[in-house]
């Protein structure tokens, strides 16, 4: 059944119920615009979502800027000027692109934004059009209810899924003055963790892992495939390299963030100790569906993803390469990565050329800040018995550009208690992506409280 809802421009957002219905209507438009980013410069075409958002702000007392570094790749920046230049500003970074969806694998139209069973279905409903819509709705609501003390900015940002080259990375490099980067909010927050004793916690992303992609190259003497006697093919050599890398010891985290994450589960003492010291590999199974996440955020991780060797079946190749998707923890440097690789390669290290591909250090924001405290207080209003747990993301978000420019970046949303983190992580980029209408409602209500608390402090 097609869902009918008011156009987002028509509704009066001055009551909480209307904030929610306005957000759902705007979310539906953003999903239906289908701004699929397949990592090529001509994809995405976020101009459609920028147009929808600009129309949504029509008549509101805001200033709007459009940035278009490549045809169709539009980022929209909406500013509500504060009355007090000394007051802390707040910037809401909502990306407007989505990853592609293979409609043949979905049980619903991925760009239909249909509503059924209390859920809204479609590509981007979780990542992250629901939050982008909530950000726009809250920004307009604050703007029309009078100027805030601190300046509030909403940015509908293109190209997040391709690491921001035509979006946040471009802005941070070429036009950093268009945004205030000091206090930023974006995705990855608000899901629940259930501890071993049944108590509840809510996660807030305060950082994300870095990327340290490598290509390992080996060389041997090439030759004719008909005379292999006493020859080592580059294929054989890269296979040995791949085996050694697969067995490498991955440096584990020993920082407070990991310790805090582990202790929030209230495991028994010996499990807690094994997790904190990172001594045994099997211990992560205790996290159940969160095991691979827990392992990823407590280790340098290395995934062997691309191998290249040989072209003709009758030629023994003289060169082969192996590409590694490596993710670093806060504090781990390029040198740490190369050292760990050389150690794993052992006596082969001298014969392996290590090439650096994309290299970006992990970023992290401290938690002793006014914005983090405002987030804690806001979550506490809705879940007074739940702990708030700062975590790092295993993947990336636009917040790393804010952190690199000296600003703070935190993930925020707020979901109901049964929307646990493993479930929500499993919906990112997934087939039949969907979000509960109740979770959209709670997110926009909580975001409105957070923004009000921060830009209009008592
Ligand atoms: Zn996202």
Image (tube, helix red, strand yellow):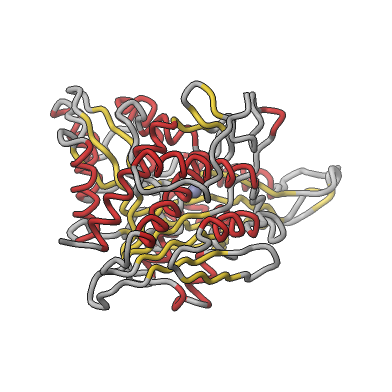
- Residue 235: x %, y % from top left: 68, 45
Residue 395 is left or right of residue 252, and the answer is right
Q: Residue at x 55, y 31 (%)?
A: 121
Looking at this view, is 156 or 317 the one in front?
Answer: 156
On screen, 167 above or below 233?
below
Looking at the rendering, which quadrant does residue 336 occupy? bottom left
Q: Quadrant of the N terminus?
A: top right
Count of picture labels: 0
Q: Position of residue 172 (x, y in %)?
A: 47, 72
Q: Does residue 286 appear in this view? A: yes
Residue, x 59% and y 65% (percent of image)?
166
In percent of width and height, residue 210 lies at 42, 56
**As displayed, is residue 166 above or below residue 44?**
below
The residue closer to the viewer here, 285 or 370, is 370
The correct choice, above or below, for 78 with respect to 306 in the image is below
Nearest the camera: 174 or 30? 30
Q: Residue at x 68, y 50 (%)?
A: 234
Using the image as rendered, state which of residue 48 and residue 418 is in the foreground. Answer: 48
> Residue 39 location in percent, x, y?
65, 54
The answer to whether residue 354 is visible is no
Position of the C terminus, as image quadrant, is bottom left
Q: Is residue 119 left or right of residue 267?
A: right
Q: Is residue 135 above or below residue 201?
A: below
């Amino acid at each position: 059944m097609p869902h009918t809802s008011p156009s987002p421009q028509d509704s009066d957002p001055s009551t909480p119920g209307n904030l929610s219905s306005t957000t759902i209507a705007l979310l539906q438009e953003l999903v239906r615009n289908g701004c699929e980013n397949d990592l090529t410069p001509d994809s995405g075409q976020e101009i459609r979502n920028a147009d929808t958002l600009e129309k949504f702000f029509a008549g509101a007392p805001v200033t709007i800027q459009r940035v278009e570094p490549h045809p169709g790749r539009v980022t929209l920046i909406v500013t509500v000027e504060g009355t007090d230049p000394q007051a802390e500003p707040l910037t809401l970074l909502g990306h407007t692109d989505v990853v592609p969806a293979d409609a043949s694998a979905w049980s619903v139209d991925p760009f239909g934004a249909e509503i059924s069973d209390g859920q809204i279905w479609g590509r981007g409903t979780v990542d992250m059009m629901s939050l982008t819509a909530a950000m726009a709705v809250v920004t307009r609501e604050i703007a029309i209810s009078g100027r805030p003390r601190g300046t509030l900015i909403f940015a509908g940002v293109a190209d997040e899924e391709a690491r921001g080259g035509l979006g946040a990375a471009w802005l941070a490099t070429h036009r950093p003055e268009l945004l205030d980067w000091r206090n930023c909010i974006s995705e990855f927050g608000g899901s629940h963790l259930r501890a071993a004793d049944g108590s509840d916690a809510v996660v807030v992303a305060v950082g994300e892992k870095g990327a340290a992609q490598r290509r390992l190259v080996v060389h041997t003497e090439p030759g004719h495939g008909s005379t292999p006697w006493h020859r080592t093919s580059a294929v054989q050599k890269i296979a040995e390299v791949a085996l050694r890398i697969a067995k490498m010891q991955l440096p584990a985290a020993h920082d407070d963030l990991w310790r805090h994450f582990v202790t929030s589960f209230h495991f028994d003492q010996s499990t807690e100790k094994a997790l904190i010291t990172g001594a045994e590999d099997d211990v992560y199974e205790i996290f159940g569906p969160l095991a691979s996440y827990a392992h990823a955020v407590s280790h340098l991780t290395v995934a062997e993803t691309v191998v290249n060797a040989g072209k003709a079946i009758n030629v023994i190749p003289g060169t082969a390469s192996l590409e590694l998707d490596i993710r670093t923890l806060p504090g781990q440097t390029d040198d740490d990565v190369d050292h760990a690789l050389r150690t794993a390669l052992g006596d082969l290290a001298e014969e392996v050329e290590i090439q650096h591909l994309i290299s970006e250090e992990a970023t992290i924001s401290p938690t002793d800040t006014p914005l983090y405290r405002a987030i804690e207080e806001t979550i506490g209003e809705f879940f007074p018995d739940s702990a708030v747990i700062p975590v790092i993301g295993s993947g990336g978000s636009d917040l790393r550009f804010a952190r690199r420019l000296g600003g703070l970046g935190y993930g925020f949303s707020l979901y109901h208690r049964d929307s646990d983190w493993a479930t929500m992580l499993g919906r990112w980029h997934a087939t039949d992506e969907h979000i509960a209408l109740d979770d959209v409602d709670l997110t926009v209500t909580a975001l409105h409280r957070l923004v009000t608390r921060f830009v209009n402090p008592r």
